[in-house]
Image (cartoon, rainbow, N blue to C red):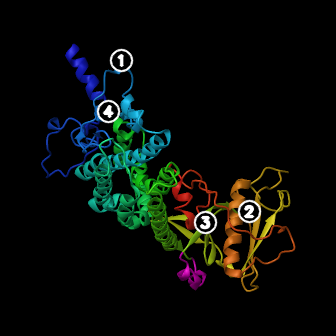
Amino acid sequence: MLQKRKRKEKDDDTVSLSSFDLKEPSNKRVRPLAKVSSLVNLISPSKNGAVRRFGQTIQVRQSPGMSLKASSRAAGPTPTKRRNSTLWSETLDIHQKSTFSTKEIKRQEAIYELYRGEQDLIEDLQLARKAYHDPMLKLSIMTEEELAHIFGDLDAYIPLHEDLLIKLTEGTGPNGTVAEIGQIVINWLPGLNAYKNYCSNQLAAKALLDQKKQDKRVQDFLQRCLESPFSRKLDLWSFLDIPRSRLVKYPLLLREILRHTPPDHSDVASLEKAITIIQEILSEINVRKGESECKYYIDKLEYLDEKQRDPLIDNCKTLLCHGELRNKSGSRLHVFLFSELLVLTRPVTRNDRSCFQVYRQPIPVRDLALEDLQDGEIRMGGSFRGAFTSGEKAKNIFRVSSVDPSHGQSHTLHVNDVYHKQQWLNCLRTAMTQQQGAPPTLQQGEGVPAKRRSTTICNEETDENCPPVSEIVMASAFCAGSR
């Protein structure tokens, strides 16, 4: 009885292959599942568990927290795997610690944070492959082509980050400190250009993953992984997005090291140069990502009449912002502000493919006029019919129109809140300033002079009305967390 109970408890905490809906052709021999009772052996997160103390030769060992085997149910739910949060100073004994100044300890802590972050990144990249990619391929949950599109070339980046760990280890002295890190980083940074394609493909990869999640087998697999200890309660996209979030941390980490480096230290000039280099790399990646995002949405535009297709759309390289707004009648529109055109659309689905049906004629930004309407100017009965209750004032609205008489267009648009309204106004004014030199002067409502767009960006993953600004993706929106 005790034996059976223990076995049941063990099985409860593993991801059993028999729980997946695996449909094989009737003429194909099926391998007995008894020999592979769980996914533990198939999707072991990473055999490269924790790396031993900083300053020593890198030795890989299995971390106790990596095990997918849980203790008894009576002892509580399976704990999630935890990261190593040891500080550099905690690796020293009392005598060693007393030989360093407070400033030097803070500098080494900052260097160690960079080092430990590389360890974590490598582990996550390996986990994405072993716990998600390989099992889904083996179980035919997704095709090899689909997985390649979603995961990209993640394996190629592991040696890149392992190389930095090796260089930092070689640069560590007998006392456990790294005397000069600037030149090490300068020599290593050009390798990050390999992420250009990966970051450019993220939007399309996310769209494909979301589409595949409609498949019950994919849903089931990802849910079981999410509930397993190795996931740390993170979904698959969180792991795939980790390289992006790591990239934008490098300038912050280097600045922190520089902040704790004495002004007369020989490492100061190298650190400053390294910060400049990483910013240039991120800027280049940002441009590529912005162009890719712009093309992605342009390809999804659907025209009811070919006359709607303005030739300017082919010149658009930047998507300044986009999001869901409501028009005067309360209908939902998805509005795109490209560098050359303002395009109003209605989201539609064609053969299981989401696209955006162009509504009316796109308005060239050079012909655009903007009017900031005051709260209460538009009331129920005159506009936004159905969007507001009787007698309620309309808030957070603005109007866009074309100064070209041949277009004869005017659109009154409603935003959810004042913050997002201001974001839209800032984006529109910026685009108009770039195309027109200065926005047209309007007689009604528009009393605020044109100004540069705010760099405060919210996370478009969690708020569909937030306009993501591709120009500063790397500096701001690129730092936003995933959903």
Category of crowding for the residue at label 4, using alpha-carbon neighbours closer than 10 angstroms: few (below 14), some (14–19), many (at least 20):
some
Asked if residue 310 is among those painted magenta in the image, a careful observer would answer yes
Asked if residue 476 is among those painted magenta in the image, a careful observer would answer no
Q: Secondary structure at mark 4?
A: helix
Marker count (numbered): 4
Left/right of residue 256 with respect to residue 55 in the rendered view: right
Residue type at numbered disc 1: Ala
Q: Secondary structure at mark 2?
A: loop
Range of residues picked out in magenta: 304-317
**N-terminal label among 4 and 3:** 4
Numbered tag placed on residue 83 in the rendering: none
**Number of the front mark, 3 or 2:** 3
**Number of the front mark, 2 or 1:** 1
Q: CA distance from mark 3 to mark 2?
A: 23 Å
Q: Secondary structure at mark 3?
A: strand
Asked if marks 4 and 3 touch (Cβ < 8 Å), the reply is no
Numbered tag placed on residue 74 in the rendering: 1
Q: Which residue is mark 3?
A: 321
Q: In the rendered image, which quarter is residue 347 located in?
A: bottom right
x%, y% of residue 291?
49, 72
Q: Is residue 160 above or below residue 225?
A: below
Asked if marks 4 and 1 touch (Cβ < 8 Å), the reply is no
Asked if marks 2 and 1 touch (Cβ < 8 Å), the reply is no
